[in-house]
């Protein structure tokens, strides 16, 4: 079949990890007889350099018209001093919002091969980690009113968190749907002992839960959740949370799997089209060194195949190829524990070969 995929390499290690994912997608094309028309467009800092804005209109239009979008990473020290509305990250936020992608799914699993790379004590790691983080993506404090102003104690800055019932309902439904096909447990994470947005979040999630009697709902305060993630992550199935809490908890959850380089994510809205990206950033310190771990991006490509392109066998083939390559002992630097490691491009070649063989 034919598909249109927009590639957004972005900044830092973005281009390297997107090349890695393309090598794997090329193997999928060959093995399964598909045709992915892949077109690379600018976003983030590189878009600021080439067009003056972090999300050029043409990029957004092409993304909306594609079957799916695969993104590397945005940001870097080069653009730290540009004014806030021109920061590379603004490009990513405008893309998520412009495409209406309110649901960010971040699957967290600890591969048995990587138990030693996990900072968890082995008795905790052995119990396994298999969590789906469902993060609200286009609301909350990321998108509320903000600014600088003169206050009674001099200059001050403020950011506001706003959540409507409608925004909470639609993300909660996604979490319950996903839990229905997993272990039937939703942990909704908030700060309802302090924040009004969290009180509304809790009450709304309670109401949605009534339509899913098979799914067990539990509420957890975000500070406790951060602690539970390192004490016993095996207790969680689906974690449902806001934009900011989801950002923070997903980095923590990634670390317990051995490396932030391992985790993919998909961002979905009302339609089929999705944005797929690793959860990590642009890692400017290792950019251009062919050292990054491409697995998060390759697994994001697998999510793209399974979700937006509805190529479920192909998605499973990519996931299995990743597992087989790890089982063979290949490791990028971040998961090698100081031992022998391979480059980003070599890891991708091996995964592509595993698909073809
Ligand atoms: C993520 C990233 C982004 C976010 C940044 C780059 C704006 O940290 O996808 O987790 O905060 O959402
Ligand atoms: Mg983040």
Image (cartoon, rainbow, N blue to C red):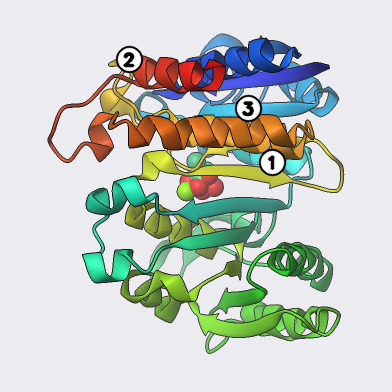
Tell which circle, 1 or 2, labels the residue nearer the N-terminal end.
1
Determine the secondary structure under disc 1.
helix
Residue 231 shown left or right of residue 173 in the figure? left
How much space separates mark 1 and mark 3, taking CA atoms?
12 Å
Residue 74 showing in the rendered view:
no
Toward the front, the furthest residue is 357
Q: Residue at x 80, y 70 (%)?
A: 169
Q: Which mark is residue 96?
A: 1
On screen, residue 288 above or below 317: above
Of residue 15 and residue 263, the one placed in the foreground of this image is 263
Residue 277 shown left or right of residue 251 in the figure? right
Tell which circle, 1 or 3, labels the residue nearer the N-terminal end.
3
- Judged by depth in the image, the label closer to the viewer, 1 or 2, is 2
User: Within 8 Å: ligand 1 and the Cβ of disc 1?
Assistant: yes
Q: Residue at x 60, y 12 (%)?
A: 26
Q: Quadrant of residue 12?
A: top left
């Amino acid at each position: 079949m034919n598909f249109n995929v927009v590639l957004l390499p972005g900044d830092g290690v973005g281009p390297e990890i997107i090349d890695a994912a393309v090598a794997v997608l090329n193997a999928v094309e060959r093995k399964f007889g598909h045709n992915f028309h892949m077109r690379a467009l600018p976003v983030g800092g590189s878009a600021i350099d080439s067009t003056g804005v972090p999300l050029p209109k043409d990029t957004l239009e092409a993304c909306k018209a594609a079957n799916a979008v695969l993104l590397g990473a945005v940001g870097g020290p080069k653009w730290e001093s540009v004014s806030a509305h021109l920061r590379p990250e603004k490009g990513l936020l405008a893309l998520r919002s412009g495409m209406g992608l309110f649901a960010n799914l971040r699957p967290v699993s600890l591969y048995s091969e990587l138990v030693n790379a996990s900072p968890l004590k082995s008795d905790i790691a052995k119990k396994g980690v298999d969590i789906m983080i469902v993060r609200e993506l286009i609301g909350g404090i990321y998108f509320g009113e903000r600014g600088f102003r003169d206050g009674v104690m001099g200059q001050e800055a403020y950011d506001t968190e706003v959540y409507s019932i409608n925004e909470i309902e639609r993300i909660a439904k996604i979490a319950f749907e996903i839990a229905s096909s997993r272990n039937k447990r939703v942990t909704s994470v908030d700060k309802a002992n302090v924040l009004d947005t969290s009180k509304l979040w809790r009450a709304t999630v309670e109401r949605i839960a009534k339509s899913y009697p098979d799914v067990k709902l539990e509420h957890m305060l975000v500070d406790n959740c951060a602690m539970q993630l390192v004490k016993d992550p095996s207790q969680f199935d689906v974690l449902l949370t806001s934009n900011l809490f989801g950002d923070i908890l997903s980095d923590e959850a990634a670390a317990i799997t051995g490396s932030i380089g391992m985790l993919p994510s998909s961002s979905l809205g009302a339609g089929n089209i999705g944005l797929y990206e690793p959860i990590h950033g642009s890692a400017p310190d290792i950019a251009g060194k062919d050292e990054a771990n491409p697995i998060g991006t390759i697994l994001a490509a697998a999510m793209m195949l399974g979700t937006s392109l509805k190529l479920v066998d192909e998605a499973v083939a990519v996931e299995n190829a990743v597992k087989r390559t790890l089982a063979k002992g290949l490791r990028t630097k971040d998961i090698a524990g100081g031992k022998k490691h391979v480059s980003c491009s070599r890891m991708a070649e091996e995964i592509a070969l595993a698909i073809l063989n």
